[in-house]
Amino acid sequence: MKKVAIIMGSDSDLPVVAPAIKQLKELEIEVEAHVMSAHRTPQEAQEFSKNAIENGFGVIIAAAGMAAHLGGVLAASTTLPVIGIPCSAKVLDGMDAMLATVMMPPGIPVATVGVNAAKNAALLAAEILAVGDEELMAKLIKMREDMAQQVREKDTALQEKIKEL
């Protein structure tokens, strides 16, 4: 199975991306995480994405805040799917990062999840990899079935509480 790379613009983004790392590990998807900056180490970021396919990656997740150009820098140097996680900052509460990540020019897409939505980025990466992996697809289907069952159980419990009102 292909690996997933998580590239953070700063080590301060680790608390944001930790749920993605955990989710990928739970799905038994190999994950690597690195710190690279679109502005401070652009050559290293481009080199990483240029070589990502031959290094066994199937998806790249880019987590960055503020100007949030990391996803675009990585996407410009590979045809692998790149998923951006806009990270919240003290100013503008992540909306700046969201807009910078989602507003890519035609021809260089970056899929974008919600602000700080690392778990969804991991699940989207898993869904992309599952297109060619029946075992992974079965795990994702089971996960969704389990979530649906949890909702049903919560509804049953709610109905019991309502009876008591």
Image (cartoon, rainbow, N blue to C red):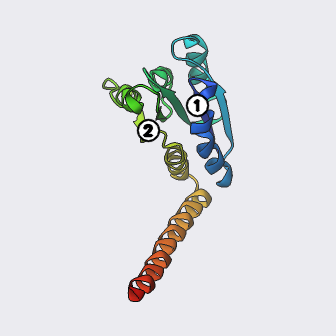
Q: Is residue 123 above or below residue 140?
A: above
C-alpha span from label 1 to label 2: 12 Å
In the picture, the disc for residue 135 is none
Residue located 59% across and 23% down the image = 10
Whether tag 1 and tag 2 are in contact, CB under 8 A, the answer is: no
Q: Position of residue 71 (x, y in %)?
A: 47, 26
Q: Which residue is mark 2?
A: 115
Q: Which amino acid does the dot numbered 1 rest on?
A: Asp
Q: Quadrant of residue 97?
A: top left
User: Badge 1: few (under 14), some or many (20 or more) residues near its Cα, within 10 Å?
Assistant: some
Q: Residues within 10 Å of mark 2 (few under 14, many from 20)?
A: many
Residue 130, position in %: x, y? Answer: 54, 52
Q: Which mark is residue 13?
A: 1
In this rendering, position of residue 39 left or right of residue 93: right
Tell me the kind of residue under disc 2.
Val
The x and y percentages for residue 155 are: 43, 78
**Where is 55 relative to 165, above or below?**
above
Residue shown at 32% from the left, 23% from the top: 105
Q: Does 109 sit above or below residue 165?
A: above
The image shows residue 103 at horizontal and vertical percentages of 32, 27
Residue 13 visible in the shown view: yes
Q: Residue furthest front?
A: 165
The disc, 1 or 2, on the residue closer to the chain's N-terminal end is 1
Please state which of residues 33 and 163 is positioned toward the viewer in this rendering: 163
28 relative to 106 in the view: left or right:
right
Mark 2: secondary structure: loop
Horizontal placement of 115 versus 48: left or right? left
Q: Quadrant of the C terminus?
A: bottom left
Is residue 52 in sight in this rendering? no
